[in-house]
Amino acid sequence: MRPRCETRSNSNLSCVVNFVVGRGVAQELTRHGKTLAFQRESPQHFANSNGEFRSSVGFVRPRGLAKEHDDWWKKSLRYAEAKYFAGLALGLKPHIAADVLPHSTATILTAVGNLRSWRHFLSALPSGNGAGHHDEQEISLSVDAATVLAPLQSVFKGTFPDQFDFALQT
Protein backbone atom coordinates (compact mmCIF):
# COMPACT_ATOMS: atom_id res chain seq x y z
CA MET A 1 0.00 0.00 0.00
CA ARG A 2 1.62 3.22 -1.15
CA PRO A 3 0.01 6.64 -0.86
CA ARG A 4 -0.51 8.54 -4.09
CA CYS A 5 0.38 12.16 -3.43
CA GLU A 6 -0.29 15.18 -5.61
CA THR A 7 0.82 18.77 -5.18
CA ARG A 8 -2.03 21.17 -5.84
CA SER A 9 -0.03 24.23 -4.79
CA ASN A 10 3.34 24.79 -3.22
CA SER A 11 1.86 24.68 0.28
CA ASN A 12 -0.67 21.88 -0.07
CA LEU A 13 0.28 18.28 -0.75
CA SER A 14 -2.68 15.87 -0.87
CA CYS A 15 -2.24 12.13 -0.36
CA VAL A 16 -4.78 9.52 -1.43
CA VAL A 17 -4.74 6.02 0.08
CA ASN A 18 -6.99 3.19 -1.10
CA PHE A 19 -7.76 0.43 1.39
CA VAL A 20 -9.52 -2.87 0.74
CA VAL A 21 -10.85 -3.83 4.16
CA GLY A 22 -13.92 -5.34 5.78
CA ARG A 23 -16.92 -3.10 6.49
CA GLY A 24 -16.18 -3.20 10.23
CA VAL A 25 -12.62 -1.93 9.78
CA ALA A 26 -13.88 0.72 7.33
CA GLN A 27 -16.30 1.96 9.99
CA GLU A 28 -13.47 2.22 12.53
CA LEU A 29 -11.20 4.12 10.17
CA THR A 30 -13.89 6.63 9.19
CA ARG A 31 -14.95 7.08 12.81
CA HIS A 32 -11.38 7.91 13.92
CA GLY A 33 -10.22 9.71 10.77
CA LYS A 34 -11.98 13.01 11.39
CA THR A 35 -9.17 14.96 9.69
CA LEU A 36 -9.44 12.96 6.44
CA ALA A 37 -12.05 12.82 3.70
CA PHE A 38 -13.35 9.30 3.01
CA GLN A 39 -15.27 7.67 0.20
CA ARG A 40 -16.55 4.15 0.75
CA GLU A 41 -17.56 1.79 -2.01
CA SER A 42 -19.03 -1.62 -1.30
CA PRO A 43 -18.41 -3.75 -4.41
CA GLN A 44 -21.46 -5.95 -3.81
CA HIS A 45 -23.69 -2.96 -4.56
CA PHE A 46 -22.51 -2.48 -8.13
CA ALA A 47 -23.98 -4.03 -11.24
CA ASN A 48 -22.02 -4.81 -14.38
CA SER A 49 -22.66 -2.99 -17.68
CA ASN A 50 -25.71 -5.23 -18.36
CA GLY A 51 -27.34 -4.27 -15.07
CA GLU A 52 -26.60 -7.72 -13.62
CA PHE A 53 -25.01 -8.20 -10.24
CA ARG A 54 -21.93 -10.32 -9.63
CA SER A 55 -22.42 -13.94 -8.67
CA SER A 56 -20.30 -13.62 -5.53
CA VAL A 57 -19.49 -11.13 -2.79
CA GLY A 58 -15.94 -10.33 -1.66
CA PHE A 59 -14.95 -10.92 1.95
CA VAL A 60 -11.87 -10.05 4.01
CA ARG A 61 -10.68 -12.71 6.46
CA PRO A 62 -10.29 -11.26 9.98
CA ARG A 63 -6.64 -11.30 10.98
CA GLY A 64 -7.35 -12.64 14.46
CA LEU A 65 -9.39 -15.62 13.27
CA ALA A 66 -7.88 -18.93 14.40
CA LYS A 67 -7.37 -21.59 11.73
CA GLU A 68 -9.67 -24.01 13.58
CA HIS A 69 -12.54 -21.54 13.07
CA ASP A 70 -12.08 -21.21 9.29
CA ASP A 71 -14.81 -23.75 8.39
CA TRP A 72 -17.37 -22.03 10.62
CA TRP A 73 -16.44 -18.61 9.20
CA LYS A 74 -16.63 -19.74 5.56
CA LYS A 75 -20.00 -21.49 6.08
CA SER A 76 -21.37 -18.36 7.73
CA LEU A 77 -20.23 -16.22 4.79
CA ARG A 78 -21.73 -18.59 2.23
CA TYR A 79 -25.05 -18.47 4.11
CA ALA A 80 -25.04 -14.65 4.26
CA GLU A 81 -24.05 -14.41 0.59
CA ALA A 82 -26.89 -16.77 -0.40
CA LYS A 83 -29.38 -14.68 1.59
CA TYR A 84 -28.08 -11.50 -0.06
CA PHE A 85 -28.62 -12.89 -3.57
CA ALA A 86 -32.00 -14.33 -2.52
CA GLY A 87 -33.01 -10.81 -1.47
CA LEU A 88 -31.94 -9.43 -4.85
CA ALA A 89 -33.94 -12.17 -6.58
CA LEU A 90 -36.99 -11.09 -4.54
CA GLY A 91 -36.57 -7.59 -5.95
CA LEU A 92 -34.95 -5.93 -2.94
CA LYS A 93 -32.71 -2.98 -3.65
CA PRO A 94 -29.02 -3.89 -3.22
CA HIS A 95 -28.49 -1.60 -0.23
CA ILE A 96 -31.41 -3.25 1.58
CA ALA A 97 -30.34 -6.79 0.72
CA ALA A 98 -26.79 -5.93 1.87
CA ASP A 99 -28.02 -5.61 5.45
CA VAL A 100 -27.62 -9.39 5.80
CA LEU A 101 -23.91 -9.22 4.93
CA PRO A 102 -21.34 -9.36 7.77
CA HIS A 103 -18.64 -6.88 8.77
CA SER A 104 -16.16 -9.03 6.81
CA THR A 105 -17.69 -7.90 3.51
CA ALA A 106 -14.96 -6.32 1.39
CA THR A 107 -15.13 -2.56 1.08
CA ILE A 108 -12.98 -0.21 -0.94
CA LEU A 109 -12.20 2.80 1.23
CA THR A 110 -10.45 5.84 -0.23
CA ALA A 111 -8.96 8.33 2.22
CA VAL A 112 -7.76 11.78 1.15
CA GLY A 113 -5.93 14.35 3.20
CA ASN A 114 -3.04 16.76 3.26
CA LEU A 115 0.15 15.87 5.12
CA ARG A 116 -1.04 17.61 8.28
CA SER A 117 -4.25 15.54 8.27
CA TRP A 118 -2.38 12.27 7.75
CA ARG A 119 0.14 13.16 10.46
CA HIS A 120 -2.67 13.94 12.89
CA PHE A 121 -4.46 10.68 12.08
CA LEU A 122 -1.40 8.41 12.14
CA SER A 123 0.20 10.03 15.20
CA ALA A 124 -2.95 9.24 17.18
CA LEU A 125 -2.54 5.51 16.62
CA PRO A 126 -1.22 3.37 19.46
CA SER A 127 2.55 3.34 19.31
CA GLY A 128 3.21 0.57 21.79
CA ASN A 129 5.47 2.83 23.87
CA GLY A 130 3.01 5.36 25.27
CA ALA A 131 3.89 8.01 22.68
CA GLY A 132 0.94 8.99 20.58
CA HIS A 133 -1.35 11.90 19.98
CA HIS A 134 -0.24 15.22 21.51
CA ASP A 135 -2.79 14.95 24.33
CA GLU A 136 -1.84 11.30 25.04
CA GLN A 137 -5.30 10.09 24.03
CA GLU A 138 -4.60 7.16 21.73
CA ILE A 139 -7.17 5.79 19.36
CA SER A 140 -8.54 2.42 20.35
CA LEU A 141 -8.54 0.23 17.24
CA SER A 142 -9.32 -3.41 16.63
CA VAL A 143 -6.49 -5.80 15.80
CA ASP A 144 -7.56 -5.73 12.13
CA ALA A 145 -7.51 -1.93 11.84
CA ALA A 146 -4.20 -1.59 13.69
CA THR A 147 -2.64 -4.27 11.46
CA VAL A 148 -3.79 -2.44 8.33
CA LEU A 149 -2.49 0.95 9.49
CA ALA A 150 0.89 -0.04 10.98
CA PRO A 151 2.49 -0.58 7.53
CA LEU A 152 0.97 2.70 6.33
CA GLN A 153 2.70 4.52 9.20
CA SER A 154 6.01 3.09 7.98
CA VAL A 155 5.33 4.12 4.37
CA PHE A 156 4.60 7.71 5.38
CA LYS A 157 7.66 7.76 7.65
CA GLY A 158 9.87 6.49 4.80
CA THR A 159 8.37 8.87 2.23
CA PHE A 160 8.18 11.99 4.43
CA PRO A 161 10.70 11.47 7.27
CA ASP A 162 10.66 15.11 8.41
CA GLN A 163 6.85 15.20 8.62
CA PHE A 164 6.33 11.82 10.28
CA ASP A 165 9.06 11.76 12.92
CA PHE A 166 6.91 10.38 15.77
CA ALA A 167 7.41 6.92 17.22
CA LEU A 168 5.82 4.20 15.09
CA GLN A 169 4.04 1.06 16.22
CA THR A 170 6.27 -1.97 15.96
Image (cartoon, helix red, strand yellow):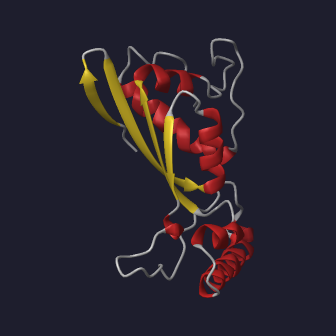
In front here: 65 or 103? 103
* Residue 168 appearing in the image: no
Of residues 2 and 114, the one nearer the viewer is 114
The quadrant in which residue 60 appears is bottom right
Q: Is residue 123 above or below residue 60?
A: above
Q: Residue at x 62, y 44 (%)?
A: 145
Most foreground residue, 32 or 52:
52
Q: Is residue 125 visible in this depiction of the protein?
A: yes
Q: Position of residue 17 (x, y in %)?
A: 41, 41
Left or right of residue 24: residue 55:
left
Q: Residue at x 33, y 20 (%)?
A: 12
Residue 27's x, y, as percent?
64, 47
- In the figure, residue 15 lies in which quadrant? top left
9 left or right of 3?
left
Question: Going 66% across and 52% down the picture, which residue do you hit?
Answer: 24
In this view, 83 is above or below 138: below
113 up-or-down from 163: above or below: below
Residue 71: x percent and y percent?
Answer: 70, 77
